[in-house]
Image: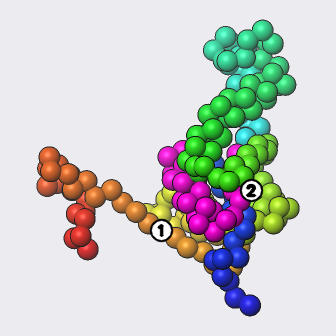
Amino acid sequence: GGFAISNIKHILVPTDGSEHSLKAAQFAGDLARSLGARVTVLLVLDEQSIVADAWNATAGSSDVVGDGGTVEAVRSMMEDRAERNELADTRDAVGEMDRGADTVQVWGHPANNICEYAAKHDIDLYAVATVQEEVGLRGAITAANAVQPDIGIALDVTMANDLPDAKPQERVAEMGGG
């Protein structure tokens, strides 16, 4: 009774719409298609940002028009904007799925809400993108501690910048150079 990749039936893709989360979503979509698994894209909206957007609305510098920046108006505007932007971009990155990718928005703290959602919805694989690996693997360790996976797979990448017109000092690495 060990882990078998073929047992993956449901993949969770938390997103913030960043380039890194879109790459994780693309990987999750490719894997899901090869395994016949389903994908759920999860966006956690931060309630603390409601105050800033409501303040901007009353100052006339927000998308909320005519409601005077009420919390309800700002929350609704943020949800609509997330559906059009982060969730739409992540669905596109996942790609075509037989059943489509489910999308979910929740409000609260990202790490807590991602783990709570996964625990309640029989998630087999989390596809997360993290940063700060250069300073003690902070992003990967934080994700692993929050998720407590049976198995963790970390992929570290860098841009080679080995383009023909790149100056020698700009080349971080060269393909095939080890």
Extent of the magenta region: 16-43
The answer to if 19 sits in the magenta stretch is: yes
Q: CA distance from mark 2 to mark 1?
A: 21 Å
- Quadrant housing residue 73: top right
Helix, strand or loop for disc 2: helix
The residue shown at (52%, 70%) is: 154
Q: Which residue is mark 2?
A: 114
87 or 92, which is in the foreground?
92
Tell me if residue 136 can be seen: no
48 or 129, which is in the foreground?
129
Quadrant showing the C terminus = bottom left
- Quadrant housing residue 59: top right
- Quadrant housing residue 134: bottom left
Task: Estimate the x, y position of residue 162 in percent, counting from the top left.
Answer: 21, 56
Q: Disc 2 residue type?
A: Ile
Decide: few, some or many residues near mark 2? Use Cα within 10 Å; few <14, some 14-19, many ≥20: many
The residue shown at (22%, 63%) is: 174
- The chief SS type of the magenta part is helix
Relative side of 82 to 130, left or right: right
Q: Disc 1 residue type?
A: Leu
Determine contact: label 2, label 1, CB under 8 Å. no
Quadrant showing the N terminus = bottom right
- In the displayed structure, 75 sits above or below 127; it is above
26 or 6, which is in the foreground?
6
Helix, strand or loop for disc 1: loop
- In the displayed structure, 78 sits above or below 152; it is above
Colour treatment of the image: rainbow
The answer to if 49 sits in the magenta stretch is: no
Task: Estimate the x, y position of residue 27 in percent, counting from the top left.
Answer: 54, 59
Give the total of numbered labels. Answer: 2
- In the displayed structure, 58 sits above or below 11; it is above
**Residue 36, numbered label:** none
